[in-house]
Amino acid sequence: MAEISKGEEGYILEALAQALNLNNGEPQAKHGAATREPDQVIAKGDALLGGYSNILDSTGFFVYNQFSTGETLTFNYSNLQNARFDGKQITNITYDITNIASPQGTTSITLVVPNDPTEGFIAYRPDGTGDWQTDKMEFRVVAKYFLADGTQVSFTKEKPGVFTHSSLNHNDIGLEYVKESSGKFVPINGSSIQVTNEGLARSLGANRTSDLNLPEEWDTTSSRYAYKGAIVSTMTSGNTYTVTFGQGDMPANAGGISYWFALNTLPVARTVTPYSPKPHVTPDLEPLPDPVPFTPEVFTPKTFTPENPVTFTPKPLETVVEPSVTLTKVTLPTTPSPEPLPKVPDVPTIHYHDYTLTTTPSILKEVVNRDQTDIHNKQIAKDSDVIYPLTVDSLSSNRPQTTSLIFEDYLPAGYAFDETKTKSDNPDYDISFQAGKNFVTLTAKASLLEDLNKDLSKSYQLVAPKLYGTVQNDGATYSNSYKLLINKETPNAYTVTSNVVTVRTPGDGTTTTLIQPQKQNENADGVLINDKVVALGTTNHYRLTWDLDQYKGIEVDKDQIAKGFFYVDNYPEEAMLPDSESVQIFTPDGQVVSGIRVTTYASLSEAPNALQEALAKRKITPKGAIQVFEPEDAKTFYETYVTKGQNLTIVTPMTVREDLYNSGKTYENIAYQVDFGQAYATNTVTNSVPVVKPSKHNTNDKGVTIDGKTVLPNTVNYYKVVLDYSQYKDMVVTEDALAKGFYMVDDYPEEALTLNPDGVQIMDKEGNLVKGLSVKAYASLSEAPKAVQEAMAARNFIPKGAIQVLSSDDPKAFFGTYVKTGQTLVVTTPMTLKNTLIKTGGQYENTAYQIDFGLAYVTETVVNNVPKLDPQKDVVIDLSHKGESLDGKEIAFNQVFNYRLVGSLIPANRATPLVDYQFNDDYDEAHDEYNGVYKVYTLVDVTLKDGTVLSKGTEVTRYTLQEVDTEKGQVAIRFDQSFLESLTDASEFQADVYLQMTRKAAGQVRNTYQHTVNGYSISSNTVTTTTPEPETPQPETPKPQDPPLPSTPPAQASLLPSTGDSQSLLALVGGGLLLGLAHGLSKRKKEDN
């Protein structure tokens, strides 16, 4: 409990209770960074801390090298031991620290946050320009305190919190201040820190120890003069304490400098302990002695004998004689003869006592306004002219000579004395003023004394001198008297003290309510949406409270009224479109208020001069456009609403601009109430529009993303669309907005994909199945629900053709379960590739849209490629002549030749693995004889998963399997599954097969083969050859021939299983020799012929 002690220095100017105790340090506390991790964590003694290591008890410090303007960092403090509220332990504290302004020419500062919450934070800045008003840094701190049971501390009048803001220096290096407290600033008597007109709690002049003529340093918590640089702020309502710390640069150069800002309750003001009654003391008395036995005597009454009665005998009456008058005749007197006068006596000597009588004049202090209306005990407006006439009764006649006449007046704190006006209006006095004490002295000049003493036998009436000034504070009481000193320092000296006069300004929170204009944002349903995310196109119904109730019964002069009344909405024109025609103004009982015009100005410079001056006085500079509410007749407004203390409510609707679509922009709105030339700011309302980022990706059956990759036949595309509701957490919307529903539109390529609606799945981020959504396909957008058509048209989104639409069955339930909780949902839509696209190849695209509250947001477009499968067939003599096609040519009877089967090129970067690559040739067994001899080669460089590279032209026969049916003329060659699994999807693949045939019949032969990739077969081109009838051979004597050289058969592939019968296997084993000799045998036959 701080107590006022007759103006004694060091005491708070009001009696304040204290329920919050943050007096003791918490060096053991632990702090965590909730917004982002610090750039480094340092310990006590680190070079960066310098001297702070000696004065701070914290052991760990978070360091943020760049704390940017506009950024907010949140810190949580736990493991607290000493903090208390109303005797209960505080276990957790959170601070939200916002960088409001960085030093001029910079966009950030270095921030250091100790682990002890009572030690605040340190800000590092470079030296600046020397202009503290423009080159400054400001930090808003929002503090919350939590008890052990998890409840948040809530302050009340009975249990307030009194915060100390100390060590507020003002010197040639910098100026420190606090402002915008959610509590009420209360000065300390004798402190240099006062609340100024600009709303800052700071020292008006330099307050070094030498400047204040103190015997010891005040800027330490242990100094008895610590209050010289301090002020307190008391919180009597709410559960969050907000204050802004500031520092401005001063002219002296100091290089890089740092400033420490702390938030605690350390008592720097003098305090008194509340009275505690002493406990009742029971005296230890000696026991009473035993009573003395007493036997009372028996009372025996005496016998009463009455006296004999007395008999009264009246006397007889006397006879009354009637009176008679006798008249006697009188003789008139004769004329007397006068005697001579006696002799004149001598003059006597007279003795007497000499007395001097004096009178003391009565004096009177008055208080009037500019209209000379008495305002004693009245409520007046802040910044009103207050005039003090110092009236003295007539000086009595026959008074002694007056040698001096002095008026002394200690003006009340917050009264701005107009020395110039006072001197001008009182030319008969020498006037001196001590600003530090607000003490004025008026000393009568010699000319006035001469006039006053000209005729002492007559009374003299002084003209009352007047003191001029204005009252500067809200919620203040100004009580004042003065002293009149006559004939000071003479035997006839005497002093007279006047009466006390009092005026008050509204807004003290006790006698009158605080002047607190309010601003709230509501939606169309009247639900509060302050600090909420709002959808594009939402109408914000800003509710403004014109706070006039504290003015009830106020007395002001006509000039004060002429300053006008305004309410200014500094709305963010880059985000909002005001609707002035729909503005509503009404009283608390719902009566519509008329006579107030609503005007929108592009800037303050276009507004009325009175408004510009009022805002300039408070150094308020609206950012851009403003909406101004102004009574058409100030006097009528004053008499109707102001003096009656009737609050007004203004509802001004504004719509979120389309320009903010998906910007994530945060916009702020603040308003100002201006009465009698004084401006008061509302709270700032912040809202933001969401950034909605739905996304779409294509995945394979294993969930691997395959965006942009090549898709092989029979592939199922598992498209995953992420519906992003994360920005909508705790959002409040109107019923009509909910009615617009929630949708997902999938613009799939119907020419390439087949829908599988039964396979659609929707999961939340926890992997739970989402219900309450329906899926339906439409041939075009024109068939879709109207809400979908309108949302798509509003953003000029035009699907190419068919669409698949997912919709919420119950939008309100869906909103409450998934949207308002900030969920992200994953929609999986399987679609199978149409193999018709394989014949031509190409690419297909897929785009999706998320529609919320009638607004459409687009995903990225997913593109996939489809290779053209183009198998080719040719006829060649052998591998060495593969460039010499026999297609359309003759093949001799019994000629050994090869059908070349060229497989399709499978591109690299595949979405799905190559699991099937085979050749099926239904050859003409009546004309061609096939004995199972074949060879397979790569046509491109092929990379295996282990990094092995099979160069182009590598024989890979051993990695294949063959099935032959000679009776039907069918041969099937496919790559072994193990080999295909060893291929990397990042490598392309292509192979060709050589089937060795012998022509055994004449005629025309047509041949086509089927090429199969991943289960999809496609026909090659057809080759045609002819064989003429053979001539009858003439017998010849055979020439002896050398036996053929033996040839080593090719090694059997380890991956090649035994398939078919032994004859087929034997033919395959000999295939290498036969294929290798094919060309030689053909050549020899030609030579022989």
Image (cartoon, grey):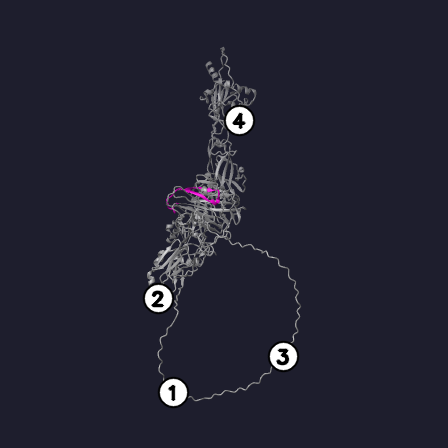
Which of 224/70 is in front?
A: 224
Q: CA distance from mark 2 to mark 4?
A: 135 Å
Query: In terms of sequence position, does the residue under pointer 2 or pointer 4 come before the other?
Result: 2
Circle nearer the viewer, 2 or 1: 1
Label 1: few (<14), some (14–19) or many (≥20) C-alpha neighbours in 10 Å: few
Q: What residue is disc 3 on?
A: 309
Circle nearer the viewer, 4 or 3: 3
Q: What residue is disc 4 on?
A: 978
Give the structural element (helix, strand or loop) at label 3.
loop
Q: Three-letter amino acid code at disc 2?
A: Leu
Q: Position of residue 523 (x, y in %)?
A: 47, 49
What span is colored magenta in the figure?
A: 107-135
Q: Answer yes or no: do the residues labelled 1 and 4 have beta carbons within 8 Å?
A: no
Q: What residue is disc 2 on?
A: 456
Mark number, residue 334: 1
Q: CA distance from mark 1 to mark 3?
A: 72 Å
Residue 966 on the magenta segment: no
Give the structural element (helix, strand or loop) at label 1.
loop
Query: In terms of sequence position, does the residue under pointer 4 or pointer 3 come before the other?
Result: 3
